[in-house]
Amino acid sequence: MGDRYTIKAAGSETGGAFALIEALVPPGGGPPPHIHRREDEAFYVLEGELSLHVDGRDATASAGSWIMLPKGSLHWFKNTGTAPVRMLIHVSPAGLEDYFLEVGRIPADGENGPIVPSKEDFEKLLALAPKYGLEIHANGAY
């Protein structure tokens, strides 16, 4: 949804144990509220600051923060600042990276800014989520 993800370690390289993804989240960026049914997820914030919502609790995470999200938790994050947020996303077991590959697109040469998602992008995100054990709560406030 406008974030830029780079897969650093895929399940095909870790025997399916985990995947590691670097995320660049532009100002205003972040996913809609969602639940992972298959994997635990964790974030390590490298640069910037995120607003987080996890199971009814709000928090802020800045550079150096480690956030663990057990599978089944309803969560979302948003970059409410003016600079991009860079973070690492760890998922265990692997598989979520395949979702990102299927719903995302490879940036065109020279395309460095945020990718503005279209209505079709959002519809694809929603349609493919169940295949990967994701529940998207798009009607929730975020």
Image (cartoon, rainbow, N blue to C red):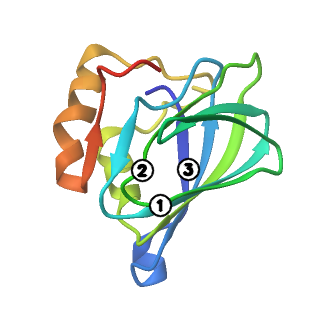
- Seen at 77% across and 22% down, the residue is 83
Instruction: Assess whether mark 1 and mark 3 are in contact (beta carbons under 8 angstroms).
Output: no
Left or right of residue 60, residue 35 in this image: left
Picture layout, residue 50 above or below residue 88: above
Secondary structure beneath disc 3? strand
The answer to which of marks 3 and 1 sits earlier in the sequence is 3
Q: Depth check: 73 or 34 in front? A: 73
Residue position marked by numbered label 3 in the rendering: 6
Which of the 4 image quadrants contains residue 126?
top left
The amino acid beneath tag 3 is Thr
Mark 2 or mark 3: which is in front?
2
When the figure is inspected, residue 90 is found, relative to residue 49, above or below; the finding is below
What is the number of the mark on residue 70? Answer: 1
The N terminus: image quadrant: top left
Tell me where residue 124 sits by quadrant. top left
Q: Which residue is mark 2?
A: 73
Residue 65 in the image: state x and y as whole percent. 77, 50
As drawn, 133 above or below 3: below
Point out the tag, 2 or 3, that comes first from the N-terminus. 3
Q: Amino acid at mark 1?
A: Pro
Q: CA distance from mark 2 to mark 3?
A: 24 Å
Q: Would you say the residues marked 1 and 2 are in contact, meaning their CB atoms lie under 8 Å apart?
A: yes
Q: Residue at x 48, y 30 (%)?
A: 108
- In the figure, residue 106 lies in which quadrant? top left
